[in-house]
Image: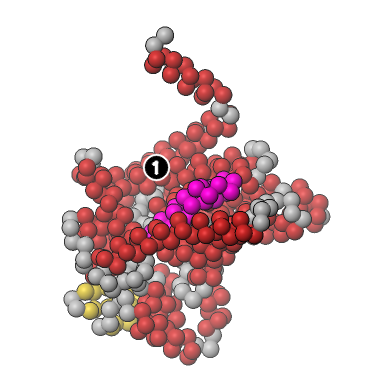
Amino acid sequence: MTQLETYKNDLLDRLKKLPTDYYYLALIVVTSFITRIVYVFYFTDYKHYLVSDMSGYWNRALAMYEGNIFSMFHWAAWPVFFKIYLSFLFKIIAFIGLYKHLLESVLTFHIFLSSISIVFFYFIAKDLINKSPIPMLATLFYAFSYPLIYLNAFILTENIAIPVFIFSVYLLFSSNNKNPRIFFSGIVFGFTVALKPSLAPIFLSFLFYLLLSGKKSGISHLVKSVIFSLGFFLVIFIASSQIFYISKGNVSGLHNSTGANFFLAQCKYRGLSSSYKKHNFSLGPPLNWKHKEWPTFKTNHPINDQKYFYDLGWECMKKNPHWLKERVLNLKELFLGNLFPGFSSARYFHPLIDISKWLMVFMSCFSLLLYSPLKKKIIPISKVLFLISIPLSVIIVSFPYQPESRYFYQLLFVIELLFFLTYSHFEYIKKKFL
């Protein structure tokens, strides 16, 4: 028997010993990948979706790829590191000879990442829920969640940030107090935040989890938190340094237009048009687009003039006696708002996204029943509190800005995990309340 045949037989023996669940998982992942490919490339008009934010990301990443890295257009608005990531991805695609199919290659790569993240979702679910076959059912449900399949047709931060975020949570939950794994979890979550800075407050959720979980001493928890933080801030420092470099010192963080977003959330303008040194920018939250009677705010200040826009926003807020009520009511947009981007050319978009909205509302409300098993400590408390804190962080961050349903769809994996965890304890909950 040759060495190759020995290796082949050894591999077959190992495959035979794998749990049956792994075969089901592989089937779900492959089927989800094929479904996403078919939907994106045959049921959407993906080539015409490079407009608005998607156009900004794509065109500026192309300019970076071509060597024009210092333009103000790259760093004045929108997450900068995502454009840097895209330009690097373009180089890889060109190197392997697929540049003629650049858009298709990028979308396929993101679909691949989304499909692989299903594996990590399964292991998180299995860690939380020890009642078979619920982890597999949760994974099946997540793998075919329509909003995430639909978003795969777009050049958006979610398509890389969500899979990476799930991977960071998997690393955290499976770390078993191993410092290298905790450090790597910090690196991966740092990459998530570099791509999507609005997720930065969730860093505190990771820290609190590490500080409160386990049975070892407080010093041990503190050490784990420091190790995670080192990995996290290492990536943030590298990303911020790169942004600082391409902006020639104009940007010292990850994002530079939060002031403009704050202003548009407080003042009644449909959008913002900034013209500064031949650099023209337009910005407008989807929630503001509904108000066709509102004017567009025009200014010669650069869109990244944070102090200017924050000051304007504060003035509008102080003059509005109904500010708090409006902010609270606007939070419903996280669940029931119109999804941006929303294209009717995507087959079955309207019925499927409407069903998804109400499913998300139902799952969120149903998950409130976790209070009883959480109080009785019959579920992993630190992990559940960690997961609950993630959507709460998004709600808190969204409060002073204009919320969008896309912000919550990126956390769909958390909502579905909590829903299926609640379902796994439903018999106990029924006995408690009925």
Residue 325 percent coordinates (x, y):
56, 80
Inspect the magenta stretch and tell me whether residue 189 lies in it: yes
353 vs 399, nearest the viewer: 399
Q: Residue at x 44, y 71 (%)?
A: 287
370 vs 286, nearest the viewer: 370
Residue holding disc 1: 112
Quadrant hosting residue 307: bottom left
**Image quadrant occupied by the C terminus:** bottom right
Q: Does residue 287 appear to the left or right of 124 in the view shown?
A: left
Q: Which residues are magenta?
A: 170-195
Labels in figure, total? 1
124 vs 144, nearest the viewer: 124
* 337 w.r.t. 125: above or below: below
- Magenta span: predominant SS is helix
Residue 348 percent coordinates (x, y):
43, 50
* 46 w.r.t. 292: above or below: above
Badge 1: few (under 14), some or many (20 or more) residues near its Cα, within 10 Å? many
Label 1 SS: helix
Residue 383 percent coordinates (x, y):
62, 54
Q: Residue at x 21, y 40 (%)?
A: 97
Q: Residue at x 50, y 66 (%)?
A: 201
**Image quadrant occupied by the N terminus:** top left
Instruction: Give the amino acid type for the residue marked by disc 1 in the picture.
Output: Phe
Residue 202 percent coordinates (x, y):
52, 62
